[in-house]
Image: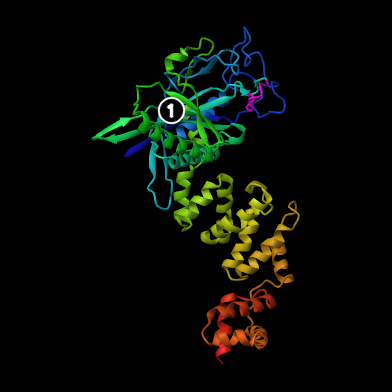
Amino acid sequence: MDYTVIIGLEVHVQLLTESKIFCGCANKFNPDHPNTQTCPVCLGLPGALPVMNQEAFRLAVKTGMALNCDIPSFTKWDRKQYYYPDLPKNYQISQYDLPFSQDGWVEIAVDPEQDEPRKIRLIRAHLEEDAGKNMHDESGGGADSLVDLNRTGTPLLEIVSEPDLRSAAEAKAFLQELKLLLGYLEVSDCNMQEGSLRCDANVNLHVHQDGKNIPTPIVEVKNLNSFRGVEMAIDYEIKRQVKEWESTGKTMGEVAKETRGWDAERGMTFSQRGKEEASDYRYLPDPDLVPVIVSEEFLEEIRNDTCEFPADRRTRIREAYSLSQYDAAVIVDQGRAFADYYEDVAGHCGDGKQAANWMTQDVQRELNERNIGIQDFPLHSSVLGDVLSRIVKKEITTKSGRDLFAELLNIDSDEIITAEQIHQIIVDKGLAVVSDTGQLEGVIAAVIAKNAKAAEDLRGGKQAAAGPLIGQVMREIKGADPAIVRQMILDAVQE
């Protein structure tokens, strides 16, 4: 069966404001104290009137501009009729026909080393209020369903893509790039476990048959809240739709659109309900909120407050520091603070590749082991830059640099580490490069005498035999250069 996968995503992003979008209630994740961050406005009590959160709108426009969207000068609010326990007003304040942004795009590459970036078009990004959270008894035991309205009224940005994605891997790459951009912009914490970033996936197939493209019914898979979940749900849904087509041959329009959920434990989607159309929501302009006029001065202010975007930064640091595409992607994709730290280190040591190696290996390992972010790393970027500059200048070897790195990590993080302290550690631990060949010759001669078999094997051409000999010399003289030691051993065994 020959077919093309057609995927569009609807991504929901909670914005990082202190208060909710239309009232003064705190905007924070607080599941341990349900229904405590509420007021007459977000509870929808009679007579309560909403007031727009200007910061929420600013963050939304900042995101829209970063997504290459057009920002109209006029936008308005609409009521989306929505009867469900998690939205007490029985309507959601959203945007319908005049959203604040539209017609944008995001570039993605599933494998940056091999793939050319591909533009995924965006239909729109609009601003709305989030609903509350329902909690049901999933065991089938018949316990009560609960609702927590703390989340009701949280500013929510909905980003809707065109159906340009062609695989589950592309959908995952799109979400990862979007999450990275939102983090750089500091508009959301994008914590998927807390629901700050979640998405719905619209999936169907175009079956190629008899020279025609035959579309199968569209299915919307709801509330996916992890990259792995998105990828697995879409992969499952593709296989399910292939079997459905082979069994029924039903095409788009012959059956109603369907909404399905994702069961991560069983690894399968399941039917929930028929898919609503825009007419089912009975949109109408919200009479309690005035339209928003967006001025050029407002847009210019946002442009001046916007950081360098991840895609641009990958290109720049790859060229500025002579990095591979892979290294640049790893550094930038760790987040804005990590990339800032890297550039500081590279500037201090004068060797971008050396800095990249240490950041992606030694530093990243420490971060993972300590379960912290780069902002909590105990060594200031200037300190690591000092260590690496000594390696670059061949004052210490890479191995000595790692020993020095370990020593510095043991210093109280509140203490300011100076260049003098670093130098003293090098002296005290004997980490400086040993240039005294006489000292090396004596140690090498003693090592060869104690390892006659290894020396004989090396003399006979077994290059691997040099390793243990080099290791013993390095243990005796920590500041020895391995390359020099190797050559001196080779010379010594031939004498």
Q: Is residue 138 above or below residue 289?
A: below
Q: Is residue 330 above or below residue 165?
A: below
Residue 191 appears in the figure? no
Q: Nearer the viewer, residue 145 or 19?
A: 145
Q: Residue at x 64, y 77 (%)?
A: 434
Disc 1 element: strand
Q: Position of residue 493 (x, y in %)?
A: 57, 88
Magenta run includes residue 142: yes
Q: Residue at x 44, y 40 (%)?
A: 168
Kind of residue at badge 1: Val
Q: Position of residue 326 (x, y in %)?
A: 47, 54
As drawn, the residue found furthest toward the front would be: 247
Q: Main secondary structure of the magenta part?
A: loop
Q: Which residue is mark 1?
A: 219
Question: Which residues are the magenta region?
Answer: 136-143
Tell me where residue 161 sits by quadrant. Answer: top left
